[in-house]
Image (cartoon, rainbow, N blue to C red):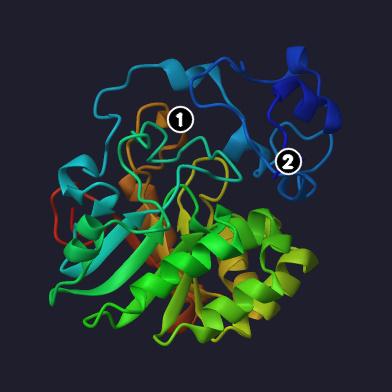
């Protein structure tokens, strides 16, 4: 992470791109700064301003536009906070904001305005948090953030050692981009920590384009599978990046070859600054229809949206 690109000029120079000749206006003074790992940037096409990986992280002037229907908390996180760093939206599940840190700043991130200073837990859980989690109606805990795998192995092990003591817990879920953004994060120690956890573990990755997957990711995922974790992927539908049946089909098939089962394709969460990524519902429905014709059922992700206040994700065909 220390070798990440945090300056737009440095990233563009590394990709042999002239800022003055880009087909769009960039803005690197935003309150959501650029961050992208060297590993991820190395999969971008040199000299290509339209590269689908670059477009996910490039700060544009368009982000400052005020667009009706877009807000700083599009999925109702703050209304779901039941204690500091603990969100509970859906029956049986509690989500922990483990950290504010991410190895990459995706421009469409629905938590780009999240108040992490007031809403996160520490690896050493306080009595109030443990009391909130130790409840018969919480059988699954989701580690989120930020990215929970930005915690080092020692801090992660401390957190899991407390969670495994919860008598009602049946499952653990980890939402992360780290095996893709920084494959070296999948250490032997991490594999051992997850393997030793006494309950089923599911790792949900976030991969939007097949170009994000290379041999270094395949190696990391091969190691991760040795921890006996189930590996799923959820993508965000992004205009100009993956809004074609060909790209989504390749993403599902390429990921499956690396041991990833498609889970969700999310309609964009309408967070302020992301409107230029929006794909229409009609287009999303057409993409789902096309994929249904081309993929077996077990490779077909669910096309969903999240609506604040609803008690589950909602199929895009229903709203």
Q: Which dot, 2 or 1, sits closer to the camera?
A: 2
Residue 45, position as x, y percentages in the image:
80, 43
The image quadrant of residue 251 is bottom right
Task: In this rendered view, identify the residue nearer to me: 9 or 245.
Answer: 9
Residue 93 seen anywhere in this rendered image of the structure = yes
Query: Picture coordinates of residue 243 (x, y %)?
Result: 51, 49
**Residue 300, position as x, y percentages in the image:** 44, 74
Residue in view at x 69 percent, y 79 percent: 222
Which residue is the site of mark 2?
A: 2
Q: Are marks 2 and 1 in contact (CB under 8 Å)?
A: no
| Vertical position of residue 279 compared to residue 21: above or below | below
- Residue 215 located left or right of residue 200: right
Q: Residue 77: which numbered mark, if any?
A: none
Residue at 41% from the left image edge and 56% from the top image edge: 144
Q: Earlier in the sequence, mark 2 or mark 1?
A: 2
144 relative position to 196: left or right: left
Disc 2 secondary structure class: loop
Quadrant where the N terminus is found in the figure: top right
What is the secondary structure assignment of the residue under circle 1? helix
Residue found 60% across the figure and 43% down from its top: 104
Q: Gap in Å between the C-alphas at discs 2 and 1? A: 30 Å
* Viewer-closest of 25 and 243: 25
Name the residue rendered at 13%, 77% in the picture: 136
Drawn side of residue 88 relative to residue 244, left or right: left
Judge whether residue 208 can be spotted in this image.
no
Q: Quadrant of residue 187?
A: bottom right
| Rendering coords of residue 146 (x, y %) | 46, 47
Q: How many marks?
A: 2
Q: Nearer the viewer, residue 184 or 28?
A: 184
Residue annotated with mark 1:
276
């Amino acid at each position: 992470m220390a070798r990440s690109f945090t300056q737009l000029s440095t990233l563009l120079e590394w990709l042999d791109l002239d800022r003055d000749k880009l087909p769009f206006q960039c803005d690197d003074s935003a309150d959501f700064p650029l961050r992208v790992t060297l590993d991820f940037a190395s999969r971008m096409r040199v000299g290509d301003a339209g590269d689908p990986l670059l477009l996910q992280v490039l700060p544009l002037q368009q982000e400052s536009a005020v667009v009706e229907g877009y807000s700083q908390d599009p999925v109702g996180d703050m209304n779901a906070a039941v204690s500091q760093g603990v969100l509970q939206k859906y029956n049986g599940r509690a989500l922990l904001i483990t950290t504010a840190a991410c190895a990459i700043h995706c421009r469409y991130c629905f938590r780009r305005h999240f108040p992490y200073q007031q809403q996160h837990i520490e690896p050493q859980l306080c009595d109030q948090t443990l009391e909130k989690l130790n409840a018969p109606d919480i059988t699954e805990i989701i580690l989120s953030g930020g990215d929970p795998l930005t915690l080092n192995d020692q801090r992660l092990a401390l957190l899991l050692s407390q969670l495994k003591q919860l008598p009602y817990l049946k499952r653990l879920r980890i939402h992360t981009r780290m095996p893709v953004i920084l494959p070296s994060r999948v250490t032997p120690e991490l594999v051992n920590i997850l393997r030793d956890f006494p309950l089923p573990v599911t790792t949900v990755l976030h991969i939007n384009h097949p170009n994000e997957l290379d041999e270094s990711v395949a190696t990391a995922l091969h190691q991760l599978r040795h921890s006996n974790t189930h590996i799923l992927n959820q993508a965000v539908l992004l205009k100009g990046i993956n809004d074609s049946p060909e790209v989504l089909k390749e993403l599902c098939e390429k990921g499956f070859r690396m041991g990833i089962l498609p889970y969700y394709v999310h309609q964009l969460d309408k967070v302020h600054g992301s409107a230029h990524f929006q794909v229409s519902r009609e287009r999303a429905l057409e993409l789902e229809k096309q994929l249904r014709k081309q993929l077996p059922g077990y490779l077909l992700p669910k096309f969903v949206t999240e609506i604040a206040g609803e008690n589950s994700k909602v199929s895009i065909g229903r709203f």
